[in-house]
């Protein structure tokens, strides 16, 4: 986040608190934004907790500048009157009733800041901050746990998990993100309740898994997922082979983390948000792909694993296709400096080639791929685009002018000419047309 945007976000959060306070309500920043501020980081967003009810919040800010997206849970989204798109969640201090589905409260009742803090997940996320008086308000010991780098459930860890099963994954994710330790009682509760994570939707689990894999402590996090039993429920595609492949899988994952932070294969800002794909692909490679052929009569294990992941975690088609490409490219890239260029080149002009190259480079570090193939491919990728992916010498319109109709033979001819072009066997349009003139085209005539 740029500094200017951070200042805009902060000022809007202050303005919301000021307006609530001026109307006679107590208002405080709450949750993750307080944690981030105490850690010296700019919050990704601000949440405000207040004594005002949802109806009072809407009256104060007006229906045009507020949205009742979660009014039944005491939450109103307040919109910035001056800046389009700027918004903050304002939630009434509340106490939650029982959680029958292990995801959301059956009902809420409005309460006090101290009671509100008790319903939150971890102590480092349970603090408040008064921006007008610049005062931290901590009812749960969050500041001490922040200083001691501990992830601890507020109150009873079993009760917090019973309220929202996703907190088990969040505990590991926060510990990995901040390089904190899991408190013994919290870790024990996660282990006891790991099998209950199935109550959570695939989409919510996927978000936590992706965020966890994005962290610099992803290797540690995977170990925790396995030891607590969460991996068996959340990533069974890895768990069923984990005992056999854990060490090489984590070594390869560690190599991916190092590659993604080192030039020339370090991720661009856009790619950085998708680093988790390469990291998951590395784990799937070790557990599913390494010892089987790329293509076989039955569905390859690695492809079946991706299909299973997509179905259960509701991964987007784009994510699933990226994983398929990253893994599918490995056997082709392995032999890039040994076979015809026409076999490798089509893989290098795909959108996710940087991700595939990161996995290949990581594999070379652990001795699973030739060290020489990475610089060979990098030199090719650094070619000007018109050299790496030159325009075809002929296209479908040329074949149609020769009286051919689209079909299998039509496609075969275009593919053959393209391969010869990439392999420098044919270098001009005239030579390509001359080659066509010598072919038997009778079975492709209109």
Image (tube, rainbow, N blue to C red):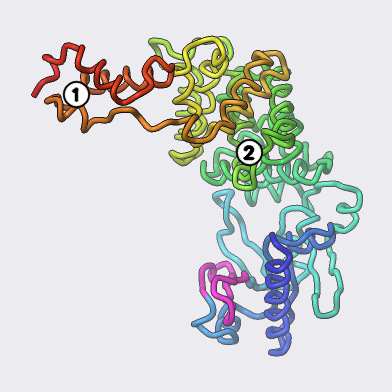
- Residue 407, numbered circle: 1
Residue nearest the viewer, comparing 404 with 393: 393
CA gap between label 1 and label 2 equals 40 Å
- Using residue 360 as the reference point, say whether residue 424 is left or right of it: left
Instruction: Indicate the quadrant where residue 195 lies.
Output: top right
Mark sitting earlier along the chain (1/2) = 2
Percent from the top left, x then y, of residue 74? 59, 71
Q: Secondary structure at mark 1?
A: loop
Q: Position of residue 366 (x, y in %)?
A: 72, 17
Displayed quadrant of residue 382: top right
Quadrant holding the N terminus? bottom right
Which numbered disc covers residue 275? 2
Image quadrant for the C terminus?
top left
Counting every numbered tag in the picture gives 2
Q: Residues within 10 Å of mark 1 (few under 14, many from 20)?
A: few
Query: Where does residue 430 sit, x and y in percent of width and height?
Result: 28, 23
- 424 relative to 138 in the view: left or right: left
Residue at point 91% right, 49% down? 148
**Crowd class of label 2 (few under 14; some 14 to 19; many from 20; radius 10 Å):** many
Q: Residue furthest bottom?
A: 23
In this rendering, the label closer to the viewer, 1 or 2:
1
At a point 54% along the width and 10% down the height, the residue shown is 338
Q: Is residue 85 magenta?
A: yes
Residue 145 vs 219, above or below: the answer is below
The residue under the point 62% across, 20% down is: 376
Q: Nearer the viewer, residue 215 or 360?
A: 360
């Amino acid at each position: 986040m740029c500094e200017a945007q951070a200042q805009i976000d902060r000022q809007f959060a202050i303005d919301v608190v000021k307006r609530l306070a001026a109307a006679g309500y107590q208002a405080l920043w709450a949750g993750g934004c307080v944690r981030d501020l105490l850690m010296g980081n700019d919050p990704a967003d601000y949440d405000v907790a207040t004594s005002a009810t949802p109806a009072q919040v809407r009256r104060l800010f007006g229906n045009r500048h507020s949205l009742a997206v979660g009014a039944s849970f005491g939450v109103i989204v307040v919109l910035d009157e001056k800046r389009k798109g700027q918004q903050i969640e304002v939630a009434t201090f509340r106490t939650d009733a029982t959680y029958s589905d292990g995801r959301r409260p059956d009902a809420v009742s409005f309460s006090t800041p101290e009671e509100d803090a008790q319903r939150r997940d971890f102590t480092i996320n349970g603090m408040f901050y008064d921006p007008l008086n610049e005062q931290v308000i901590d009812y749960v010991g969050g500041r001490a746990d922040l200083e001691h780098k501990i992830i601890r459930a507020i109150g009873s860890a079993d009760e917090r998990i019973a309220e929202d099963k996703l907190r088990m994954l969040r505990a590991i994710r926060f510990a990995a993100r901040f390089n904190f330790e899991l408190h013994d009682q919290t870790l024990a509760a996660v282990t006891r309740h790991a099998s209950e994570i199935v109550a959570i939707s695939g989409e919510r689990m996927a978000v936590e898994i992706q965020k966890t894999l994005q962290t610099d402590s992803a290797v540690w996090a995977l170990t925790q997922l396995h030891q607590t039993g969460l991996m068996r429920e959340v990533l069974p595609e890895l768990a069923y082979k984990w005992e056999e492949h854990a060490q090489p899988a984590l070594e390869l994952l560690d190599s991916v983390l190092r590659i993604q932070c080192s030039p020339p294969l370090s991720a661009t800002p856009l790619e950085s948000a998708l680093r988790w794909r390469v990291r998951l692909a590395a784990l799937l490679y070790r557990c599913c792909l390494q010892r089987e052929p790329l293509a076989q009569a039955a569905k390859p294990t690695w492809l079946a694993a991706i299909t299973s992941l997509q179905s259960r975690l509701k991964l987007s088609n784009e994510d699933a296709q990226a994983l398929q490409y990253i893994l599918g490219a490995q056997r082709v890239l392995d032999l890039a400096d040994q076979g015809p260029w026409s076999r490798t080149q089509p893989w290098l002009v795909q959108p996710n080639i940087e991700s595939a190259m990161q996995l290949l480079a990581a594999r070379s570090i652990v001795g699973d791929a030739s060290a020489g193939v990475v610089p060979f491919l990098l030199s090719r990728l650094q070619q000007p685009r018109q050299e790496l992916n030159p325009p075809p010498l002929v296209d479908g319109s040329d074949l149609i002018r020769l009286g051919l109709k689209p079909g299998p033979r039509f496609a075969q001819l275009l593919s053959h000419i393209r391969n010869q072009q990439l392999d420098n066997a044919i270098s001009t349009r005239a030579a390509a047309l001359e080659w066509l003139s010598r072919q038997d085209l009778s079975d492709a005539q209109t």
